[in-house]
Image (cartoon, coloured by chain):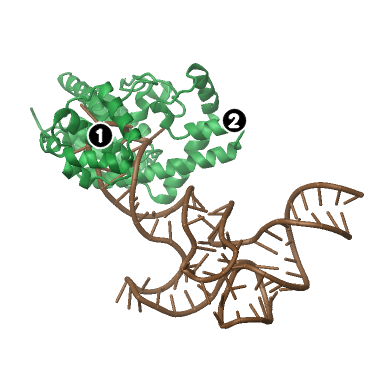
Chain colours: A green, B brown
Amino acid sequence: MNNVIDTIVIAGPTATGKTRLSLHTAAFLKKEHGLDAEIINADSIQLYKDLKILTAHPSFSEMEGIVHHLFGILDPNDSSDVAFWEHSAKSIIKNLRTQHKIAIICGGTGFYIRTITDGIAPIPEIPQNVRRKIREEFSRLDRDKFLEKLAELDPYMAQRLHKNDTQRILRAYEVVFLTGKSLSEWWRMKREESQHNIMTFFLSPDRGQLRELCHLRAQKMLNSGARDELMDFMARYPDYRGPLSKAIGYTELILFIAGKITETECIDAITTKTRQYAKRQYTWCRHQLSNAQVIKGTGYDESITYSLHEAIFLSV
RNA sequence: GGAGGGGUGGCCGAGCGGUCAAUGGCAGCAGACUGUAAAUCUGCCGACGAAAGUCUACGUAAGUUCAAAUCUUACCCCCUCCA
């Protein structure tokens, strides 16, 4: 209906202060422009309601007075995926629009964020039993055999995917198997949506700074009770193997709880994992979020906050 | 003091006469990425070089051999067990 910015995206590597920046931005919009803004989570792991310390949820005091969406909405055994997030986020954005509120999308899952501007292919959902059967077949057959089967149904994808990339091979297979159409054909059907009312920022601190932030984050996590939180979780979900178990720090903390590593070793291991993750996110954002404005610095930096607000001010 | 085991590239750890600049793993660097994305996967990784290649390397020194990380001797340092 117009070209005025009504959606602000704050992306970037973990530990760079995205949460803080989004909170400040919401406060700024209210104070300076009398605009209400609500925050939408774009972090795949913060979708879950448990392990809030480990997954770095904003605290209650931080969230004060600002409406937050899509935080802690899933149980540990629920599964999430891009399409689920896209649908949820877009319906919230639409809603906010009708109320003349600004949506601030904040999170580190670039893959999710990209759907805001680029959308996603309209592939039907694959029923659980089909997925299970395919997985069983994969583990029964050897890898090359399975790839041959894929090649029969979908030579293009079979050739394009690396043979060790199990996850993508399985996906390509389940899609052709169920729909009779190659993933690549589905991709071509993706609707292009041209959005002029979205402003995307991408936080990009320098390496040394990021290193330090990752370390601080790991330390803070332990100091705020991540260990007890996980012990409590383990008691409630014995033998848990769901999506939350891939959270950074999950395995490391379990080793620490079991007395296999010291606290310092645990913090160091988490720091390393965090840094590696941050690198992947950085590479992703740089190459995939093509029309994002790069902000050299962190959300903890006052001058960054200021210049971001200035940029928003000019478009809002 | 006696008896053994060991010292390998940033770390861990294989190799035990040639095919070894040295399997693996970790860490590091770069990258991919269309419904599991805090996931999944790829490449590089002694120095110099675009490459062919050249050089320096397996605790130190000396030796045996056409050839040594691999065998011998001495020395230095670690660890375990017995006293």
The residue most toward the top is A236
Chain letter belonging to callout 2:
A
> Which type of secondary structure does the marked residue at label 2 adopt?
loop
Spot occupied by residue A199 in the image (x, y as percentages of width and height): 20, 37
Query: Is A183 situated left or right of A57 in this image?
Result: left
Label 1 environment density (alpha carbons within 10 Å; few <14, some 14–19, many ≥20) = some
Identified by mark 1, the residue type is: Arg
In this view, A40 is above or below B2: above
The answer to whether residue B12 is above or below residue A181 is below
Which numbered disc covers residue A147?
none
The residue depicted at 38 percent of the width and 20 percent of the height is A77
What residue is pinned by disc 2? A258
Give the spatial CA distance, label 2 vs label 1.
36 Å
Q: Chain of mark 1?
A: A
Asked if residue A128 lies left or right of residue A232, the reply is: left
Residue B32 appears left or right of B8: left
Count residues near mark 2 (Cα–Cα under 10 Å), then give few for <14, some for 14-19, many for 20+.
Answer: few
Q: Position of residue A188 (x, y in %)?
A: 11, 38
Q: Is residue A225 something one can see in this rendering?
A: yes
Kindly identify which residue carries mark 1: A171
Residue at 62% across, 32% down:
A259
- Return the residue nearer the eye: A187 or A105: A187
**Of residues A239 and A20, which is closer to you in this image?**
A239
One can see residue A295 in this view: no
